[in-house]
Amino acid sequence: MFKNLNPGAIGIQTNMQEGLQLARSAGFDGLELSIGEANGLAQEHSVDYVKDLWDVSGLKMGGWGLPFNWRGSDAEYDEGLRQLPNLAKLAAYLGCFRSTTGVLPVSDIPFKENWDFHIKRLQPISRILKNHGHSLGVEFISPATLRSTQKHLFTHTMDAVLGLAAAIGTGNVGLLFDMWHWYTCHATIDDVRKLTKDDVVYVHINDAPAGIDPDDQIDHVRCLPGETGVIPVAVLLQILNDIDYLGPVTAEPFSNKVNAMEPQAAAAVTVRSLDKAWNQAGLQ
């Protein structure tokens, strides 16, 4: 596992070169890859120009989000699918093999219809990614305060998304495991112990405000890892380490306090929270 910076998750707007400098100076081990920006730089300069930026920084690549709205219209989906092979090829050449997306916990269409839609849309995506050596991490989104917003429930638990991954059937789909969503869906430590390293593609780490029931938590109001101790981040890190998860661990606190800081201060307080979690988990 390595400590990864996603600047946008802590309120920082930056380009790739600035992000690399910020992550390195703050003490992170990795940085999220903006595949769209990487593609633009490769077109403007060369692919090796982009690769050299990362090689010089010494940082690992975290992951790259699917770069189009696969839930959109057929035309939007088809265009995104057409462009995806070249972007997957670029990410593979750069050395970033973890792509991410999420599934919404509710819908205005019935469960079975929505399930079939997700398989129809995600299966071709997963096949393209597999052709270039990538895994796809799918985030389950859990807060009960979000599940009351539409008529029909959909997959909002760890097991449900693992079931969706199995139904997709390409063998390269697993979890984007977010500790916040683990907490708000009332999953247990034993549920995490059942996972294998093949089940987990990517990890988000965070904490929850104290004194609020899990069912009353608001998705965009979170805390830095270890800030309140509501979520047992050290125990979860230990389990991930035990199953030999080797990927990025990215803080996603959605904290107004952190977002209001200058970039260097926000990065520094975030990496300190990760260092503290690492130490509490007994990790190197």
Image (tube, helix red, strand yellow):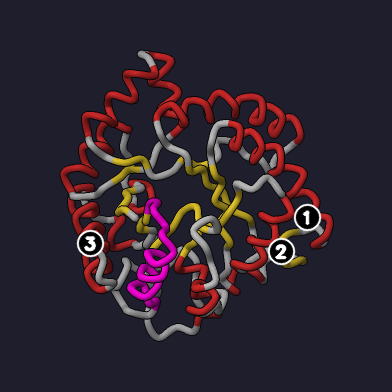
Magenta segment includes 234: yes
* Disc 3: CA contacts within 10 A as few (<14), some (14-19) or many (>=20): few
* Disc 1: CA contacts within 10 A as few (<14), some (14-19) or many (>=20): some
- Residue to which mark 1 is pinned: 114
What SS does tag 1 mark?
helix
The residues tagged by marks 2 and 1 sit, at their Cα atoms, a distance apart of 8 Å
What amino acid type is highlighted by mark number 1? Asn
Q: Is residue 91 left or right of residue 104?
A: left
Front residue (pair 200, 36): 200
Magenta segment includes 233: yes
Q: How far across and how far down the image is residue 65, in percent? A: 50, 42
Magenta highlight range: 231-248
- Residue to which mark 3 is pinned: 284
- Residue to which mark 2 is pinned: 154
**What residue is at 35 percent from the left and 58 percent from the top?**
251
What SS does tag 2 mark?
loop
Nearer mark to the viewer, of 3 and 1: 3
Q: How far across and how far down the image is residue 1, in percent? A: 34, 55
